[in-house]
Amino acid sequence: CIRDSLTLWLLGGVSSLIGAMAYAELGTAMPRSGGEYHFLSKIYHPALGFVSGWISFVVGLAAPSAAAATALSAYLMAALAISPGEGLFNTAQLTSILVILLLSMLHARYKRAGASFQNIMTSLKILVLLLFIFAGILSRTDNSLDFSPTTASLKEIVSPAFAVAIFFVSFAYSGWNAAAYIIGEMKNPGRNIPISLILGTLLVTSLYIGITYVFLKVIPMGTMAGKIEIGFLFGRELLGIDAGRVMGLLFSLLLFSTVSSLIITGPRVTQVMGEDYPGLRWFSHTSVFDTPARAIYIQAGIAIVYLTTSTFEQMITSIGFTLNLMTLLTVVGMMLFRKHLPAGASVYRIRPYPLLPIIFILINTWVLIYGLVYRPFESFGGIITAVVGLLVWYWMKDKN
């Protein structure tokens, strides 16, 4: 289990890194905000791009912000020893809703302050994770980690449970393509897109593998089962209940940056769609604060719907399927688009090619197939969302 958990995070990191390299190539060749919406519209057809943007609007970015806010409230409740409560609008849900509303107001009204907040919280998150990793490595607590390969571990890696678990890892890595959503707001995108996508993903992968290693080293596997607030458990096992509460509080604060980043990037997709489709022009409106305030508040509303109607696991599984589907199509599209690029075009190019894109395609196809078979409700929910998006596109194109 320990070996497989680390393999899971490593596989997710490798897939995300290859995806970041592919997006860097597309981003330097087609520098416009919108992420998959812009890429798929240009490579395949506007209908597929619209469906991708629709999925980002309805599921891909609202649901992750809801899931991250749920994790934040779980850490906070554990750190403060507060019962999360039961029923609709319990203490945990109200906390998550309040977080989304406050951060949405911040980014809708105060662009510079919101950017500064995001930079500070991200830097703090990196620093705290590094401290946790070093504390775990230096700790005398050791659950006797064994990394030697066995027949049983190889069977588990190709099992349905392992493939479905990738959905949860995909959620953790889901920000690897965030820079592609705000290309239009970048200075010197030809240089900064590859740097932000590739180096950012490398850093996150290293931190995730490191923190997973020390969690497994310090916390018994049985203690982690079914828990969201792993950082709280880490502190409790390492230094006692009081330190656990401090670490749980720190993790809850760090999750502010995760929710904040999704609130920043998500509405940019809706804004670009509104610029292209007159029927969605309302969403492209920029407020007096130079922010897509309407799109920000609409995404906040959708996130709150997820908070009150779905479990944490349902949100993550639905996100995982739809995100994997769209990123898979984008990486395949990168391979198709490269054929039309002039030989001397000044763009970043993924190498070694086509080996890395093929590895990405195999990993994500495997996950999608297992998701359809073993998580059909959530996976078909993603497909239905895509079909609805296609119907909306047919309605919208007649209004152009």
Image (cartoon, rainbow, N blue to C red):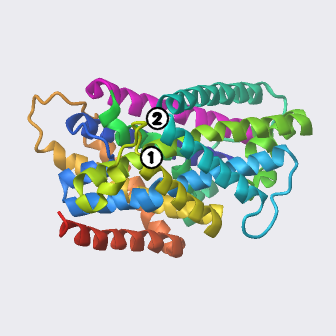
State the predominant SS element of the stretch in magenta: helix
Q: Which mark is residue 293?
A: 1
Q: Mark 2 belongs to which amino acid?
A: Thr
The quadrant in which the C terminus is found is bottom left
Say which of 138 and 323 sits in front: 323
Say which of 182 and 191 sits in front: 182
Q: How packed is label 2: few (under 14 Cα within 10 Å), some, or many (20 or more)?
A: many
With 241 as the anchor, is 352 left or right in this view? left
Q: How packed is label 1: few (under 14 Cα within 10 Å), some, or many (20 or more)?
A: many
With 347 as the anchor, is 8 left or right in this view? right
Give the distance between the C-alpha atoms of the residues marked 1 and 2, in whole angstroms. Answer: 28 Å
Q: Mark 1 belongs to which amino acid?
A: Ala
Secondary structure at badge 2 equals helix
The percent coordinates of residue 125 (x first, y second) are 63, 31
The percent coordinates of residue 382 (x first, y second) are 44, 68
Are the residues at dot 1 and dot 2 in contact (C-beta closer than 8 Å)? no
The percent coordinates of residue 275 (x first, y second) are 26, 50
With 30 as the anchor, is 71 left or right in this view? right
Q: Nearer the viewer, mark 1 or mark 2?
A: 1
Q: Which residue is drawn at 75% across and 46% down?
A: 75
Q: Which mark is residue 95?
A: none
Q: Give the range drawn in magenta.
A: 187-216
> Relative to residue 398, is residue 346 depicted above or below?
above
Q: Label 2: which residue? A: 201
Whether residue 227 appears in magenta in the rendering, the answer is: no
Q: Which residue is drawn at 48% across and 28% down?
A: 112
